[in-house]
Image (spheres, grey):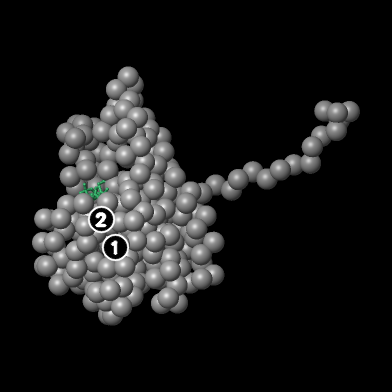
Amino acid sequence: MQLDAAVALVTGGAHGIGAGIARRLAGLGARVVVADVDTAAGSALAAELGGVFVPCDVGRFADSGHAVAEAVRAYGGLDIVALNAGVTTGFGVGEDFDPERYRRVMSINLDGVVYGAHAARPALLARGGGDIVATASLAAFAPTPQEPVYAANKAGVVGLVRALGPAWAGDGIRVNALCPAYADTAIVNPFRSALVDRGIPLLDVDDVVDAFVAILAARRAGECWYVQPGRPAEPFRFPHVPGPRPALSRQEG
Ligand SMILES: NC(=O)c1ccc[n+]([C@@H]2O[C@H](COP(=O)([O-])OP(=O)(O)OC[C@H]3O[C@@H](n4cnc5c(N)ncnc54)[C@H](O)[C@@H]3O)[C@@H](O)[C@H]2O)c1
């Protein structure tokens, strides 16, 4: 895949999966805008890639708008948006529940994707369409008793993508989700040893980035691609929702 002249915005692009996506997109010829709260690391990566850094807290709608405006100002438009910034919950499942932290995590992991998609839409429409890929997680599909709030906001992203996919496809905007299993980034550091103890393998960031590129290449919409070690990434097949049946009359019942 060649992306010459494409303009890409990557939120949470300073580290981990986002940095991997930014590097790969730049390698494929795209002009990359790195958006992150970590100005030092984000600026350094943007300089390495010959791109642009924009400070951005995805939990603030104005920041998402600013990041999109900066891409358009720097490169004249926007074609690919990786809504990737995310954090873990930071509290447990019991009495340590922290409502302020809850709101903050929801604002980054769910609002950040809603805000990013809506901030990007006008710029994508101006180019006749483009791609939005939100980084959700396998936690959206599998029970995640150790991180219920993370599971909830990632399931929210999956629901959003499955709705916006068909809603915006007619405008040429392909909205999809990337749903990795545990990957080898800093986000797993708090529970890395527990994963190792349980023999749970970590994805390389490159495997996740391969799936991101496969989503772009597929050119479909409303799909949520799972990524598991040792398996080719593919769209998760959701079971059909059981349809309604005619109500039984009281006599029949
Ligand atoms: N690593 C995994 O195991 C894993 C698995 C499934 C999904 N994910 C998801 O992948 C995405 C990337 O995570 P990662 O594993 O690369 O972690 P990471 O911690 O290495 O990177 C996260 C990036 O997001 C940035 N960020 C944090 N809060 C932000 C905010 N408010 N606004 C803008 N940027 C912000 C950080 O500075 C960092 O650059 C996240 O959405 C995460 O939930 C990760």
Report whether 74 appears left or right of 130: left
Q: Quadrant of residue 134?
A: bottom left
The amino acid marked with disc number 2 is: Cys
Instruction: Give the camera-side residue of 235 and 113.
Output: 113
Instruction: Give the camera-side residue of 64 and 94.
Output: 64
User: Which residue is most to the front?
Assistant: 62
User: Which residue is most to the right?
Assistant: 251
Q: Is residue 215 above or below residue 242?
A: below
Label 2 sits on a secondary structure element that is loop
Rendered location of residue 160, percent (x, y): 47, 51
Instruction: Give the camera-side residue of 92 and 67.
Output: 67
**Mark 2 closeness class: few <14, some 14–19, many ≥20 residues within 10 Å:** many
User: Would residue 180 be visible to someone looking at this image?
Assistant: no
What residue sits right under mark 2 in the picture?
56
Badge 2 residue CB within 8 Å of ligand 1 = yes
Residue at 86% from the left image edge and 28% from the top image edge: 250
The numbered disc on residue 67 is 1
Residue at 21% from the left image edge and 51% from the top image edge: 37
Instruction: Give the camera-side residue of 194 and 122.
Output: 122
| Location of the N terminus (image quadrant) | bottom left
Q: Are marks 1 and 2 in contact (CB under 8 Å)?
A: yes
Q: Is residue 229 above or below residue 66?
A: above
Report whether 58 appears left or right of 44: right
Rendered location of residue 45, percent (x, y): 14, 62
**Mark 1 closeness class: few <14, some 14–19, many ≥20 residues within 10 Å:** many
Rendered location of residue 211, percent (x, y): 32, 60
Residue at 33% from the left image edge and 21% from the top image edge: 94
| Location of the C terminus (image quadrant) | top right
User: Which residue is most to the bottom?
Assistant: 5
Report whether 18 appears left or right of 239: left
Q: CA distance from mark 1 to mark 2?
A: 7 Å
Report whether 20 appears left or right of 112: left
